[in-house]
Image (tube, rainbow, N blue to C red):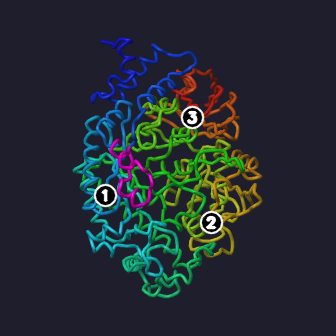
Amino acid sequence: MRPSRRDLIAWAGGTLLGSPWLRADAIGNLLLGVVEQTASPGLTRWQLRADQKRKLAGGITWLTHEPIEFLIRRGDKTPDLAQHYQQMCDPENIKRMSAAGVRWGRIFFYKGFGLQYEKNHMDIARRVADQMHSLGMKVSLYVGGTMFIETLYKEMPEAQSWEQRDSWNQPIPYGNQTFRHFACPNEPAYRAYIKRVLNIAVNDFHADEIAFDNFVLQDEPKSCRCPRCMKAFTEFLRTRYPDKEQVARRFGQPDVNAVQIKPWNSPDAPGKLTSLDDPILQEWVRFRCQTLADSAADLYGYVKSQNPDVACLLNIKGLYSFNRYWAAGVYHPMFTNAIDIMAFDTGGYDARIDPSTGALVSQIRSYKVARRINTSCEDSFADDIRAAVHMSFVYQKPVPGNIAAPYGSEAHNVFTPLLEFFREYNDRFYTETDTVADVAVLHNWPSMAYSINATAVPVTLLEQVLIQHHIPFDILFDEQLDRIGKYSAVILAGQECVSDAQIQTLLDFVRKGGTLVLTGNTAKYNDWRQPRSANPLLPARTEGNGQIVFIPEIFRADGGRQTGRMAPPQWVLPKNHREIYQTIATAMPHGLSITTDAPLTTVTELLVRPTTRETIVHFVNFDRKNTLAPFAVDIRNQFPSPVKSVACYSADADDPVILPFQEAAGRAKFTVPATKVYAMIVIGCA
């Protein structure tokens, strides 16, 4: 029997707040019933739902992944810290979370103090996890990757031998927290110890997600040079160059044992490098990336061996405009089968128009990389533009423990109209999608790895043109070159080191009808960064059925100033951005899949959902001061049958708006209504 209006209002006011059967799906429906019967003029149902959930969430003490012992040791001065933790773990607090529609929570589990030292707070965490599960909530457990030397070394004296050691054989602390040291990823005994931790998490706590944090490498000169790593590096070289002739050709001498990585002559020496020309340093950066990825794969494989439904998050962060291969040992394609979720918790990359330079800043590149390596993403939803970017660009990996973005991680306690919109439509429109991309931007390993920062500049600025001019694109790496046949064009922006084999792959792509777009010094060097006497990709020309197009220079709007790593405020469109856009657009053999007169402060993502024969276009307005005026869209039909409907979904309105459209020559044209922050266009085919 349908609840009465009085019962619904009483429920919404909190009289059923402690009901253990209350689940988020029921909450959504009941709240909608309240909204339908008590709606205030001028408020959307999304706003009303958000308001109701915020009321239900009032007084909740939100869960944290940090144990109280760590906050005390770190020096947090909050006077009511103990009371805060008591309230947070109180069963009534967990009930309030469930009643407010919260389906997920991350709780403290293992920080690195040692299993014996952390037993008390782990027992508390177990009670919280059990209650969350009884209420139908997903449990994420935090596992830290540093070793607390004051406690762990008392429990496990042998742990001191697990440390990373720098160029001068000193331990590597966690910044100024000198009581925390990093463990070496090449140490099997450390991974065996962490597997003991994971066994408890998966089999005793029945975790839905494991959140790995601080399993990282530091930049030079703090990269690990311990005996384990030195031995592993020699084996790495021996595997890559198995005979003496190869070793001699690469390093100038036939004995691989003689070409070890050497200590730095001073702490500031690495910071003076602008490129990696020494072949040993070139191999060292590859070794570090492989080491970190292999360690992650080992732990990931162990979790999956215990329960394949448990999701694994690894905080490797995203793709930014500097060389993270060299700085952090992170090369994303190596994590393709070693991660389910990657976190974006790096400061300075909040979605915005930078007030000082006008640069459009976002994590769009990171989302594109994540999709291509079959990985979900964790990002903040506290800001509507940042949330809209996530909605538009995220890939949701289908792992049972990976709860859908509207309820997980950073979204679980955010109650805004946009998030309520996302929650309702997530399963229907935001899953089972793939990109429609006209262009692939190649991030070539030796070009991006052997240039400290310079190569990041042209590729970042070229991608900025694609982002702001609404050209659909993917980011690809060397390992994904077998995909290039699906694109109309491949762009190499300043990719200076290209192997002979890759040259042939790219020329074959052109001969078959593709367009190759080159900029600046692309292919000036081979894959060992040795200069070529002649560039095999130039001059620009027609080759077979395709063409090679050359853009001589990307003119920086800031006059070419370089401050080491390229910072987000420097992502200003190049001076010649319109010419670059026109060059790429006119080079497409069949034109662009989508064109629009939406302003340059708007970003677009074009997707298909084959199971429902729908094309989905997301638009995000980065201009916080102005609502988008209606704008025209011209889009290629992605299915062989005619378009039957075009609808605009937005948190600005209760229901989708059916849009009139015209279809001719396989393309549909329509106008998107005025939009505040976000609009989703769903194009259905017969």
Q: CA distance from mark 1 to mark 2?
A: 34 Å
- Whether label 1 touches label 3, CB < 8 Å: no
Q: Position of residue 418 (x, y in %)?
A: 52, 32
What residue range appears in magenta? 63-87
Residue 625 is situated, as x and y percent measured from the top left of the image, at: 69, 35
Element carrying mark 2: loop
The foreground one among 330 and 525 is 330
Mark 3 vs mark 2, CA separation in Å:
34 Å
Q: Earlier in the sequence, mark 3 or mark 2?
A: 2
Q: Residue furthest left?
A: 204
Instruction: Inspect the image, locate mark 1, and give the three-letter code of the amino acid beneath it.
Output: Gly
User: CB of mark 1 within 8 Å of CB of mark 2?
Assistant: no
Q: Which residue is mark 1?
A: 301
Q: Amino acid at mark 3?
A: Val
| Front residue (pair 612, 263) | 263
Image coordinates of residue 230 in percent, x first then y, are 41, 79
Above or below, 544 against 562 in this view is: above
Q: Which element is circle 3 on?
A: strand
The vertical placement of 147 against 126, above or below, is below
Q: Which residue is mark 2?
A: 453
Residue located beneath label 3 in the image: 617
The count of marks equals 3
**Mark closest to the chain's N terminus, 1 or 3:** 1
**Residue 83 inside the magenta-drawn segment:** yes
Q: Is 539 left or right of 320, judged from the image as shown? A: right
Judge the density around disc 3: few (<14), some (14-19), many (≥20) Cα neighbours within 10 Å: many
Which of these two is toward me, 250 or 5? 5
**Which residue is at 44% across, 56% downward?**
76
For residue 67: magenta?
A: yes
Question: Which mark, by number, is residue 546?
Answer: none
The answer to whether any part of residue 305 appears in the image is: yes
